[in-house]
Image (cartoon, helix red, strand yellow):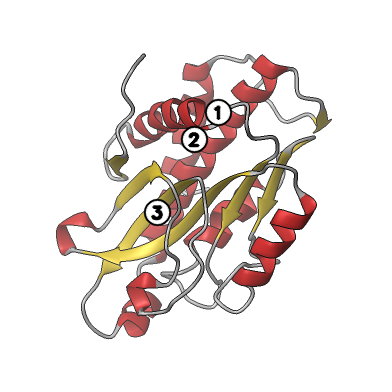
Amino acid sequence: MERIRDEISIDVNHPHALTLFSREFEKMFKHLYTDEYNDVVILCIGTDRSTGDCLGPLVGHKLKLIQYSNIFIYGTLDNPVHAKNLADVIKEIETKHERPFIISIDACLGKPERVGRIGMGKGPLRPGAGVNKTLPEVGHMHIIGVVNISGFMEYLILQNTRLNLIMRMADTISSGIHFNIWKYVKGNSVRPLQQQRPDNGKETEYIKAANQKKNSGL
């Protein structure tokens, strides 16, 4: 069995960032999502009131068209999951879903050399840690985007983060997840509520199209 690294980091500026993210996500998802879990819950944390903190809602917005019988998205631009309602949303997930496997997604601040990197790992993330907030840990698997530098005036730093970086991260994360969820659904015959799949079913074509969309700024 291939050994899965506990933490993976991908530079969003790499010319093949989407391919790298997609492959690493697939490895980790297959390793962690075992028979003990049922529903897959993608929890996108953040707020659209702050440029740096809107990575989660943007990913959720891009993923909300995924409609399969056991895939659920929480946290979008319309209905963000943030510090004030996170605890309530976690309770809602635990109540509504049987043995959920939670993939939590959030933005964070980090060292200058880490800005622009997407991190992926086992276990929960700690929302709010970068701005000195104590919030519930959540997730069986987590994805974080380092959107700016940490160390001082965190709220001002988040407000002055470039939207271009956030959009490129959101495109990479959402496209990689969408493709792997489609592969999972196809391989496990999960009933679609609304069919969302590439026309030709080929990984290279799907990723190429997503890359073209990302590069065109759409």
Q: Secondary structure at mark 2?
A: helix
Kindly check if marks 2 and 3 are in contact, taking CB atoms under 8 A apart as contact: no
Separation (CA) of disc 2 from disc 3: 14 Å
Identify the residue shown where x is 62% and y is 26%. 35
Left or right, 80 with respect to 92, comes to left
Q: Using a 10 Å C-alpha cutoff, classify the residue at mark 3 as few (fewer than 14 neighbours), some (14 to 19) or many (20 or more).
A: many
The kind of residue tagged 3 is Ile
Identify the residue shown where x is 65% and y is 15%. 187
Vertical order, 35 against 63 (above or below): above
Identify the residue shown where x is 59% and y is 54%. 43
Task: Say which residue label 3 marks.
Answer: 144
Q: How far from the left and from the top, in percent, is residue 204?
A: 47, 18
Q: Earlier in the sequence, mark 2 or mark 3?
A: 3
The kind of residue tagged 2 is Gly
Task: Say which residue label 1 marks.
Answer: 180
Q: Nearer the viewer, residue 136 or 56?
A: 136
Q: Secondary structure at mark 1?
A: helix
Task: Say which residue label 2 marks.
Answer: 176
Q: Quadrant of the N terminus?
A: top left
Q: Image quadrant of residue 77?
A: bottom right
Q: How far from the left and from the top, in percent, is residue 190?
A: 76, 24
Vertical order, 62 against 211 (above or below): below
Separation (CA) of disc 3 from disc 1: 18 Å
Q: Please count the marks in the image.
A: 3
Q: Using a 10 Å C-alpha cutoff, classify the residue at mark 1 as few (fewer than 14 neighbours), some (14 to 19) or many (20 or more).
A: some
Q: Earlier in the sequence, mark 3 or mark 1?
A: 3
